[in-house]
Image (spheres, rainbow, N blue to C red):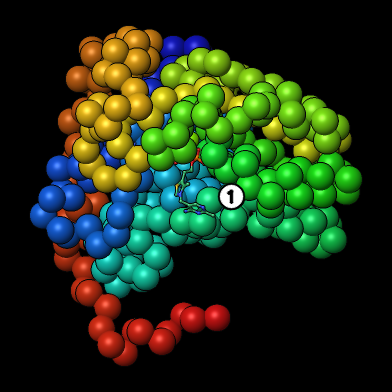
Amino acid sequence: MTNTQRYRALFRQALLIRLVEEKIMELYPFDKIQSPVHLSIGQEAVAVGVCESLYREDLVFITYRGHAFYIAKGGDLRLMMAELFGRANGVSKGKAGSMHLAAPQVGVMGASAVVASTISLAVGAALANRLQKKSGLSVVCFGDGATEQGTYHESLNFAALYSLPVLFLCENNGLAVHATLAERQTYSIHKHAQGYGIESVRVEEGWDFQKIGDVTADITAAMRKDGRPRLIEVITCRYKEHVGPGEDYDAGYRSRTDIEAWMARDPLCQDIALAAELRPELDAEIAAAVAFAESGPLPGPADLLTDIV
Ligand SMILES: Cc1ncc(C[n+]2csc(CCOP(=O)(O)OP(=O)(O)O)c2C)c(N)n1
Ligand SMILES: [Mg+2]
């Protein structure tokens, strides 16, 4: 694949994610979407860059802000949209919604609304893989806020101690709801991991899916050889409010100028010509997903107690 082909393929995927979430913003006021939505608009390049190096059998554990990873890892868009609509034809039969997306058939092992709770699951999955002599990486995506939870530290220590192939991926958007990093943390996330003996790297250019892809390619290749954990911290920017389809410039913790500076480097905002070229086919794909969701039945009372472990 040439550089241009690669750029187009990654751009296309990132644009698909953005347009899907813009469609969610458009639909949300009509109350068809049956769960809260945490949009990843502004952060798409992380999922797209990282998933470029992952195989289907690699396991990905995500968060409530998980639409981008679900799509980038190969999750079916129609099934995701139906899931958001709470329909029985959704990927989890309408019972999971946006915050608990899962598609184990493509290695999306699940999301959770409980901050940091999937980190230890990724470590456990890596241990299970090792005991069952299965190959493949365990990747866990989490926010900067999640690194303040005890389970994060236990998970890093355990993965390092048992030399497990877990890729810890921190999407550092500098915010936990409305609290900035400076108000919450004394440590540098990537340097702190080195204290556990975990090699780590920080990518400042969270808008650059190629750079994130290059870094992840090197790191995952090394992990597939030595089976050891690694951590990647990507500095990124959430454009929308913490939860919901709106903006939050009036909440007083950041300004429109901060976000505009990020947008000025974001290829999805800047490469208008490529976006215009790709948009018709992506819009058609999204419209088909919405139609699929709208055609699905709502689960009935008989479904209430099924699929419960
Ligand atoms: C254990 C737990 N504590 C608090 C919350 C409330 N909460 C939801 S999201 C969030 C912020 C998390 O920030 P971060 O991990 O940086 O992720 P981001 O939302 O920025 O993607 C908090 C505190 C929660 N859901 N779970
Ligand atoms: Mg955050």
Identify the residue under disc 1. Answer: 116
Asked where in the image residue 265 lies, by quadrant, the reply is: top left
Which amino acid, mark 1? Ala
The answer to whether residue 308 is above or below residue 71 is below
Residue 98 lies, in percent from the top left, at 36, 55
Q: Residues within 10 Å of mark 1 (few under 14, many from 20)?
A: many
Q: Is residue 220 left or right of residue 142?
A: right
* Residue depicted at 55% across the width and 81% down the height: 309
Residue 215 lies, in percent from the top left, at 64, 21
Q: Is residue 297 left or right of residue 18?
A: left
Respond yes or no on whether mark 1 lies under 8 Å from ligand 1: yes
Q: Is residue 205 visible?
A: yes
The answer to whether residue 242 is above or below residue 191 is below
Asked where in the image residue 97 lies, by quadrant, the reply is: bottom left
Residue 216 lies, in percent from the top left, at 64, 27
Q: Nearer the viewer, residue 18 or 11?
A: 18
